[in-house]
Amino acid sequence: MELTGDVAVIGGGLGGIAAALSAADAGASVILTVAEPMIGGQVTAQLTSPLDEHPLVESAGVTARYRQFRELVRTASGGARNPGDGWVSRLCFEPLVGLRVLEGMLCTHIDAGRIRVLRNAWPVAATDVAGRAAHSGASIDAVRLRYPTGTDALVRARVFVDATELGDLLPLTGTRWVIGSEGSDAFGETDAVPGAADLFAEQSCTWAALLVREAEPQPVGEAPPGYAALRDAQPFSLNLASPQSEIETGTGAFACYRFFTTGPTGLPPFWAYRRIRTAKSGATEAAVINWAGNDYRSSGLVGDPAKAGPAARALTLAFVHWLRTEAPRDPGDGPGPFGTGQGYPELRLAPELSGTADGLAASPYVRESRRLGNPRPITAADLLPATFCTPIGNPSADPVSGSVAGTDDGTAVHPAPEIADSVGIAWYHADLHPRVGHPRSVYRSAAPFQLPAGALVPAPGIGPENLVMGAKNLAATQVAAAAWRVHPAEWAIGEAAGALAAASVRLSTSPRRIVHDPALLAGVQGDLLAAGAPLSWRSTETLPSEPAPTQTEIQHV
């Protein structure tokens, strides 16, 4: 099978969907491919539907299309503002609800033939117009995809957007890429691995699971293979080490949680962390299990995919067994069915909610992708200053500093320095989970920041001129990319990539040329603004209607 379109978006996660919508809305014909059976990436196949967002998300700092997605999810969830009432996010919902919403957002373009979707197809090769392996000195002409049956499809396009979860087009197109830590020697980043680069120091991944809480105990079965060793090595616990205490004091302070009730220091329940459905819905409660206990950190999805994927799944199955059989029961819950004061066997895996046969995610939750290897990537310095300043009540936008007002705790913050080539904005902490060989986690404050267009296209000599980054694979260091990997940020990257790709087709020029021509880039910036994608934080006004901070923000911000 051979398909031809204006724009090929390889990868169907949030960045890919945003790119496809942005390009199709601009008049381009789009081929959207996804390696999994379902579109949606983090939200669906990876079961990370509780959204990781910034404190102003309800009123500012996201694109109009992303805001539409959030509101459609709430409508599809019966109008609840936070259907799961999970404390990690203001919007925790069922992954299959997210899937239906995303499919609905694409539907008009699919029906009109502007977007064609290929599922269960992953890229295996890329070629130039002469049929040679793609390389930095020529444009990409085609990408070959493979189905589980072994059959192939050939996709030809004028512009290719790499929105894959792991930056799969980068090696296939001869584009320079990096993985792991650049090391503190490269850019002077405090939170990089000390000294030289460590390309094996990928962030941990998590193979999430979805559990429901039944009224009565459910059959438990035998412990999974290697259970005891995994339990003891991780080790499994309801408590979390505080990243900030490790960073600032070198101590290993712990936050202590209980299972279903408030913890001894007032912390909310473990179960409610990523809960996606409450008893108020009239159905059994359900929660996504994505916790330190099943955070796999022994090998990387890029560096050792044959080991990392299966091992991450095995770790999660072991953690789920521990939750059901050995996790400490809350005070007042008695000895439980096992008579040991341990385990909640009423929990069970929920394939009816995960969209998979076993209640586990279809694919691992990816925190780190291959990243475009431009000489000047986004670094931690580009996410500064993170200075908390004047309380709300004073003017929300300082005419000198341009401070953004309105965090939930009543403070204002200064955005990062303004950049001329911005094609989007985002805001999140640099959230680095343990890296292979480097177990310390990082949760470092950042300022509201902008997306430089130059981070989306390969510099000359780095990769093909008609390739655009559309997800976590933008040109950024490991530390900086840790602030760009979350849901609204990935969406902003994708939306900018789609607008850039559509403009390239319309103007019959390359995305690289547009990025490096201020007049042409201004046109793309105008297109993004017209579509409701903000490019600067400087116009953000006081937002006193923001809801109370999430527990994650209370603990870390």
Image (cartoon, helix red, strand yellow):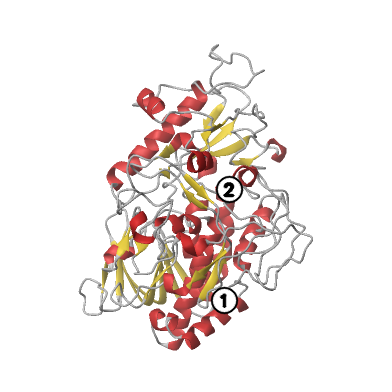
Residue 313 in sight: yes
Would you name the residue on which mark 1 appears?
A: 528
Would you name the residue on which mark 2 appears?
A: 50
Task: Identify the residue at the far right of this view.
Answer: 393
Q: Is residue 290 left or right of residue 153?
A: right
Amino acid type indicated by mark 1: Leu
Position of 209 relative to 345 (above/below)? below
Q: Residue at x 30, y 78 (%)?
A: 139
Q: Position of residue 517 (x, y in %)?
A: 44, 86
Position of 45 relative to 249 (above/below)? below
Q: Residues within 10 Å of mark 2 (few under 14, many from 20)?
A: many
Q: What secondary structure is found at the residue carrying circle 1?
A: helix
For marks 2 and 1, the one nearer the N-term is: 2
Q: Is residue 372 left or right of residue 259?
A: left
Position of 542 relative to 364 (above/below)? below
State the residue in front, 219 or 361. 361
Q: Residues within 10 Å of mark 1 (few under 14, many from 20)?
A: many
State the residue in front, 221 or 299. 299
